[in-house]
Amino acid sequence: MKIAFDAFGTLFDLEALREPAGDELYDAFYTRLQPWTWLATAGDTYLPLPELAELAFQSAGEELGVEVDAAELAGELTRLPLFPEVKEALEALHGHCLGVLSNGTADGLEELLANAGIRDRFEHVLAADSVARYKPAPEVYALAPRAFGVHADEVTLVSGNSWDAAGAKLAGLRSVWVSRGKPQASVLGLTADEVVEDLKALTFASER
């Protein structure tokens, strides 16, 4: 079994940025971050995630009329906490070939995983900056089967973002959506192959 995990919102809790940013600023930032990655890719341009996040914080501060240390807040992306069940879930998958497939940068992901003490769990760390596009661009998802050396349908993407799970399906991968209490709804008529409440509920832990 080849399993690729999304990072932000799946392994790592982006909501932790609320504390240093404050609720209003975080909400304004979050409404920009994801759509701006889509806009960049649709517009055939690319800014690495740390730069894009910094611009999103800066814009959010401008909207709210507050001064923001955008660079400092964007730097917190490499210091995010894991969701509580992550280490136990990864331990249950011992023996599987695991990777990370993320919109982050290679350097940023290496730092993030190392800071969390889970870098050794992953054979591959696959970052959007290697193709200068963001998910759901098919070039990003194609990184996983290429790295694992298998066909796309032999890779399962595990993501806490429903649009990401749908993007993986469009690219020919299998997908698992980690709902974390959100109601299930299709995206472009697509649903994940499996829906779990959290990572401990992954059902292929015993498959090899």
Image (cartoon, rainbow, N blue to C red):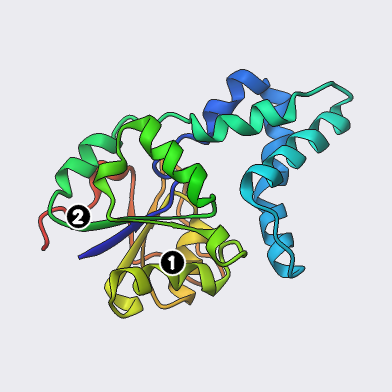
Kindly report which numbered mark, 2 or 1, lies closer to the viewer in this rendering.
2
Q: Quadrant of the N terminus?
A: bottom left
**Residue 83, percent across and down?**
37, 33
Q: Residue furthest bottom?
A: 151
The answer to whether 76 appears left or right of 115 in the picture is right
Kindly tell me whether residue 83 is visible in this rendering.
no
Amino acid marked by disc 1: Thr
Q: CA distance from mark 2 to mark 1?
A: 17 Å
Q: Which residue is mark 1?
A: 191
Quadrant for residue 172, please give it.
bottom left
**Residue 110, percent across and down?**
42, 43
Q: What label does residue 139 carry, if any?
A: none
Q: Residues within 10 Å of mark 2 (few under 14, many from 20)?
A: few
Q: Which residue is mark 2?
A: 203
Q: Is residue 3 above or below residue 106?
A: below
Identity of the residue drawn at 53% across and 73% down: 139
Identity of the residue drawn at 25% across and 35% down: 87
Identity of the residue drawn at 67% across and 56% down: 37
